[in-house]
Image: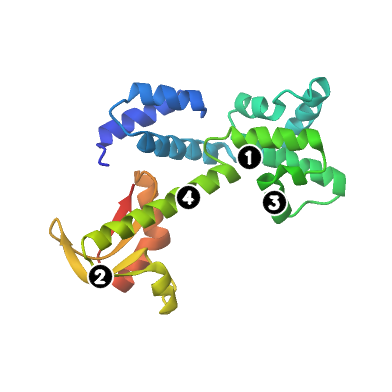
Amino acid sequence: MKLSKAQYDEIAQFLGHVQPTRQSLRKLKERFPGQSQSTLLSIFSQEYQKQIKRTHAKHHTAEAIETYYQRYLNGVMKNAAAPVLLELANEVDFAPSLMARIVLERFLQEQEGAVPTKTLINSMLRDPSQIPDGVLANQVYQCTVNDCCYGPLVDCIKHAIGHEHEVLLREMLLEKNLSFLAEEQLRAKGYDKTPDFILEVPVAVEGHIIHWIESKASFGDECSHQAYLHDQFWSYWNRILHFIFCIC
């Protein structure tokens, strides 16, 4: 879906004044009814992630971590059923899943007397029933299911959407009777870095000869394009020449 720079800037400006909640997503859809929900959700997620990256460091100072942990302890002591961590994350404008990670890591460090591994923390975030404290497990679960942009649940959704778009692209290529090699076939041939599809017979699109296609199930803002070019696309270009970059 094509979006003008002016339209994108208007959406981004609107998002700068709302919190990353499901209620804000509804407001966004009401404010821009002409845009698809998937486009708005993707922009919403990207703009929020930019904000989190800008403020990430201040939430991970030793002082901030201890403050959050003590506020969590005091909160659950007063009312263990209240969404203490979720409300704390919203108050300080930080992603709920990331707040849960901070407090969980601090809790485990206190329990074990050592810094827990990332593998252990990730496992507990994916399955809070592994957390050896029922109250904290419930708090972490609340953060995970109420986080629109971060966390294991969001990661699963993104993976599923990405796979769905690759399947749709494959079906479109087959429908057009285009001969292609998919990523798994390319890896079997020894390619170290591969796009989603290489066209065995290049095609012309709007005056450009296209050799390969990469699909990204997200909105393509300027930052995303620059990151993908640096991390992936220039290496493809050097190997396989011209391409189509699909962001759906």
Q: Earlier in the sequence, mark 4 or mark 1?
A: 1
At 75% from the left edge and 43% from the top edge, which residue is drawn? Answer: 129
Front residue (pair 164, 57)? 164
Q: Residues within 10 Å of mark 1 (few under 14, many from 20)?
A: many
Q: Amino acid at mark 3?
A: Ser
Judged left or right of residue 189, residue 57 is: right
CA separation, marks 2 and 3? Answer: 41 Å
Circles 2 and 4 in contact, beta carbons < 8 Å:
no
| Location of mark 1 (residue) | 98
**43 shown above or below 244:** above
Q: Amino acid at mark 2?
A: Ser
| Location of mark 4 (residue) | 160
CA separation, marks 1 and 3? Answer: 14 Å
Res 64 visible = no
| Location of mark 2 (residue) | 179
Q: Earlier in the sequence, mark 2 or mark 4?
A: 4
Judged left or right of residue 227, residue 35 is: left
CA separation, marks 1 and 2? Answer: 44 Å
Q: Earlier in the sequence, mark 4 or mark 3?
A: 3
Q: Earlier in the sequence, mark 1 or mark 3?
A: 1
Q: Residues within 10 Å of mark 2 (few under 14, many from 20)?
A: few
| Location of mark 3 (residue) | 123
